[in-house]
Structure formats: structure tokens, C-alpha cells
Image (cartoon, rainbow, N blue to C red):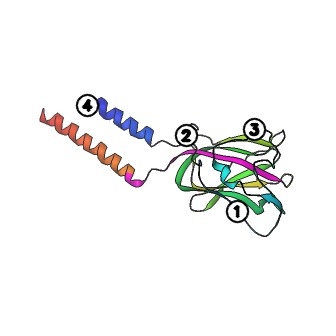
Amino acid sequence: MKRFLGALVATACIAASPAQATDPNVLLGKSASAVLFGSGSLTGGDFSLVDTLTDGNFLAEQTNWQTGTVWWQPSSANFLGIQIDLGGSFILSAFKVQVDNNENYRFEYFDGTWNSLASQVPGVIGFGMMTRDVVLAPGSEIVASALRLFPLGGDGAYAASEIQAFGVPVPEPGTYLMMLAGIGFLGFMVRRRISWR
């Protein structure tokens, strides 16, 4: 019985562990939108494909930045970004984006206030749309209910075709309460059984 109780506690600890890079894409099918900040204007852009940013499909590497993408040319880099509501709180450990090759991008996450992710999405050598990974160091996972992706400088022409975030839902307090009650009940039954003998 002690082995069973030990295995149950170990399983509970694993179930409550932080997100891992092998976790599912929590953005799949979520709604994305363009977010405008401050003063500025667009000199060009196409947002008709904004719902494809979270469809789970990447374009072929080096696809032209204006083909099958959400693209924009603002008067200033931080004037416009992409925002995605997660529909709940998630523990996030990794991101994958396909964006125009020669710009840096920044993730912001909402956990009651907007914060910038310490790691940026760096520009890469190449042409057109390029896929990039951002994996957070173990222990530096974030809890977020919404994400934003913003360009940081570059040539002033920005594009995105896929945004993915990997993580697990934040357990509700009731989940922990039920788990503790179950473990407590099992402990009580084991103790009762031992004293009965």
C-alpha cells in the first residue's frame, strides 16, 4: 500500500509540473487581431489573413513576405502588433514563429499587466518568411492569458504567417484541493487499515 501511495504522490507531482517544450500548441485555433498603439499611420498592409496566424500551418521557408501572410508597413515599428487572447491562463515554456527574416520581434505577455519576454525573436540571414524558435530556460516559464508580437526596428516592412506557444493550462485551485483531499483520504484509509490489523 505504501508503494501505491508513493506512486500516487509522484504522479501528482508530475501532473503539477511546469510546461515543457513538448507541450501542445495552446494558440491553435485562437483568435488573433491587430493592435494599434500610440500615434502613427500605416503606409501599407494586409490583415485579411489574420485568422491564419494560429492555424498550425507554416508556409514554405523563404516565401515572399507579402504572399499568404499578415503584413504591414507602419510609420513607426512599435505602432502595430499582433495580439492573441488565450482564453484562460497557461504556463508557457516555448514559442515558434514564422516572420519576415530581417526583423527582430518582441513577445509581450499578459499576467494582470503587460510584460516583455526576456528573449527576443532575432532576425536571421535569408529571404522572406523564416521560422524561429524561442525556448525559455527551465524555471523561467511564464504564466499568461494573452500574447502580443511586436516588431523591433528592421526595414519597416513586417510580416507574420504563424505564431505558436507551447504550454499547459494553469490548474484551477479546485484541482489542487481535490488532489489533496484524495491523497489525504488515501492516507487516512492506509492508517486505518494498519491500526485495524
Label 1 – label 2 distance at C-alpha: 28 Å
Q: Quadrant of the N terminus?
A: top left
Label 3 – label 1 distance at C-alpha: 26 Å
* Amino acid type, label 2: Asp
In the rendered structure, the answer to whether residue 46 lies left or right of residue 191 reads right
**Which residue in the structure is indicated by mark 1?**
35
In the rendered structure, the answer to whether residue 82 lies left or right of residue 171 reads right
Q: Nearer the viewer, residue 97 or 28?
A: 28
**Which residue in the structure is indicated by mark 4?**
1
Q: Residues within 10 Å of mark 3 (few under 14, many from 20)?
A: few
Q: Quadrant of the C terminus?
A: top left
Q: Position of residue 129 (x, y in %)?
A: 78, 43
Instruction: Tell which circle, 1 or 2, labels the residue nearer the N-terminal end.
Output: 2
Label 1 – label 4 distance at C-alpha: 56 Å
**Which residue in the structure is indicated by mark 3?**
60
Give the magenta part as a residue range: 157-174
Q: Position of residue 177 (x, y in %)?
A: 35, 51
Instruction: Tell which circle, 4 or 3, labels the residue nearer the N-terminal end.
Output: 4
Q: Residues within 10 Å of mark 2 (few under 14, many from 20)?
A: some
Contact between labelled residues 1 and 3, with CB atoms less than 8 Å apart: no
Element type at marker 1? strand
